[in-house]
C-alpha cells in the first residue's frame, strides 16, 4: 500500500457512516499530493435516491476545499462488507470525472484483503465531456 495514513483515515471515517437502512458502512480517503487527506463516509436517507456514498462525499469535499483532480495522489475505499469493496455505478461515473486517469484506487474490507485498480479499469467506457460535443 502507498500510505498507511490514508487507510487508517478511511477506516476511521467509516465509523461515522450513517447507514440505518443498508447497515453497510463505507469510508473513503483521498491522499492529496500536498499530504492532506480528504475523507468521507456514506450517508443514507429514507428516500434512497437522496443517499450519498463515501466516494462521492470525499470527492465533492476535495473540490469544495479547492483541490483539482491533478492534486490527487491516490484513493482508499474501505467497508465492513464480508466480500470485496467496490464502488457503485454512480460513484464510478463521478470518479471517472474527478480522479486522474491512472490514479490508484485501493479497495479494502475488514479482513484486510485489498484490490488496487484505476478508474479506467473500474469503468472502461465512462461517459465524459467528450461525449457532449
Image: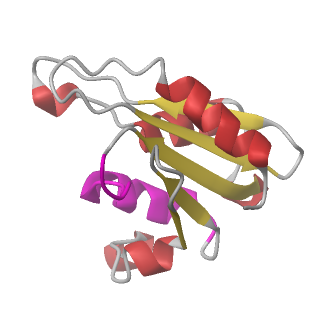
Q: Quadrant of the N terminus?
A: bottom right
Can residue 110 be found in the magenta stretch? no
Q: Residue furthest right?
A: 34
| Residue 116 coordinates in the image, percent (x, y) | 56, 70
| Residue 54 coordinates in the image, percent (x, y) | 43, 36
Question: Does residue 12 appear left or right of residue 46 in this picture?
Answer: right
Q: Residue at x 48, y 79 (%)?
A: 120
Q: Residue at x 35, y 59 (%)?
A: 84
| Residue 49 coordinates in the image, percent (x, y) | 14, 32
Can residue 93 be found in the magenta stretch? yes
Is residue 47 visible to the viewer in this orientation of the structure? yes
Q: Residue at x 89, y 45 (%)?
A: 34
| Residue 43 coordinates in the image, percent (x, y) | 34, 23
Q: Is residue 35 above or below residue 90?
A: above
Q: How many marks?
A: 0
Q: Is residue 25 above or below residue 92?
A: above
Looking at the image, which is closer to me, 35 or 101? 35
Question: Does residue 43 appear left or right of residue 58 in this picture?
Answer: left
Q: Which residues are magenta?
A: 82-100
The way the protein has been coloured in the rendering is secondary structure
Amino acid at each position: 500500500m502507498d500510505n498507511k495514513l490514508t487507510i487508517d483515515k478511511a477506516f476511521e471515517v467509516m465509523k461515522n457512516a450513517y447507514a440505518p437502512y443498508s447497515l453497510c458502512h463505507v469510508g473513503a480517503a483521498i491522499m492529496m499530493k500536498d499530504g492532506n487527506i480528504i475523507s468521507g463516509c456514506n450517508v443514507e436517507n429514507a428516500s434512497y435516491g437522496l443517499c450519498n456514498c463515501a466516494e462521492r462525499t470525499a470527492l465533492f469535499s476535495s473540490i469544495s476545499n479547492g483541490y483539482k483532480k491533478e492534486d490527487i495522489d491516490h484513493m482508499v475505499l474501505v467497508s465492513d462488507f464480508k466480500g470485496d469493496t467496490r464502488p457503485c455505478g454512480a460513484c464510478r461515473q463521478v470518479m471517472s470525472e474527478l480522479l486522474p486517469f491512472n490514479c490508484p484506487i485501493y479497495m479494502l474490507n475488514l479482513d484486510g484483503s485489498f484490490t488496487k485498480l484505476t478508474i479506467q479499469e473500474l469503468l472502461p467506457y465512462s461517459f465524459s465531456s467528450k461525449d457532449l460535443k
